[in-house]
Amino acid sequence: AQKVTQAQTEISVVEKEDVTLDCVYETRDTTYYLFWYKQPPSGELVFLIRRNSFDEQNEISGRYSWNFQKSTSSFNFTITASQVVDSAVYFCALSEVRRGDYKLSFGAGTTVTVRA
Amino acid sequence: GAGVSQSPSNKVTEKGKDVELRCDPISGHTALYWYRQSLGQGLEFLIYFQGNSAPDKSGLPSDRFSAERTGGSVSTLTIQRTQQEDSAVYLCASSSGQGNQPQHFGDGTRLSIL
């Protein structure tokens, strides 16, 4: 069963527009962690943000912000005032505590293209 | 170096050959993970190491795949009798082992089976 669903396959925007990426997850754990990673064309997966299941406070970090809602099992990610360098594939990932290994279950990824 | 290092960056081999992929994690990171990224399957977990032990090997797709870690540091993923479906990018990640700490990834090894 797919634990993380990213319904958007591709998003294309013009520079300076905001981009919101959707992520829905599924778990029976009460304690878990959610992550967003970025994979630019160079290929390396880069950690962006992290959220614990017991902390629903939404935050902003620079041009990044996220909206975590346990009631809907969603962990959406927004890039404000997008730039061409933001063009990449973005992955949402879930880490469940129950097994103790914290392995990541990834969504299929959303390809973001920012046009100048 | 400061990050996770993987070698080789690219590997092209003939079907049926054995290959070894190497991962050098961030110094001090006790947890090490191997993932595979392919077009059809996305990003898949393969195996997890805590120190030199591998308590979770559930993602290894067949008995042709094995991995080891020595000295709590370098890990080697071995694929025997490679098949074309093994073609993928193999990614290694390491972390401090605490659940709320992110995994840091290497650049990956792009494996192509002819």
Image (spheres, coloured by chain):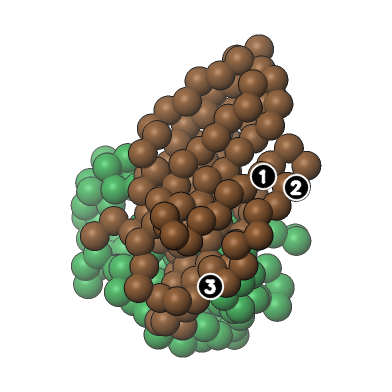
Chain colours: A brown, B green
Circle count: 3
Is residue A37 among what the camera can see?
no
Residue B100: percent from left, percent from top: 61, 71
Foreground residue, B29 or A6?
A: A6
The quarter of the picture where residue B67 lies is: bottom left
Q: Chain of mark 3?
A: B
> Quick one: SS at disc 1?
strand
Residue A18: percent from left, percent from top: 63, 27
Q: Residue at x 30, y 74 (%)?
A: B58
Between label 3 and label 2, give the one nearer the viewer: 2
Please name the residue that numbered disc 3 is placed on: B32
Q: Chain of mark 1?
A: A
> Which mark is on residue A65?
1
Q: Is residue A80 left or right of residue A104?
A: right
Mark 3 belongs to which amino acid? Answer: Leu
Residue B110: percent from left, percent from top: 44, 45
- Measure the C-alpha gap from mark 1 to mark 3: 29 Å
Marks 1 & 2, CB-CB < 8 Å contact:
yes
Mark 1 belongs to which amino acid? Answer: Ser
Between label 1 and label 3, give the one nearer the viewer: 1
Mark 2 belongs to which amino acid? Answer: Ser
Q: Residue at x 60, y 62 (%)?
A: A56
Q: Is residue A98 left or right of residue B31?
A: left
Local crowd at mark 3 within 10 Å, few (<14), some, or many (≥20)? many
> Above or below — where is B111 with respect to B48?
above
Q: Is residue A100 left or right of residue A80?
A: left
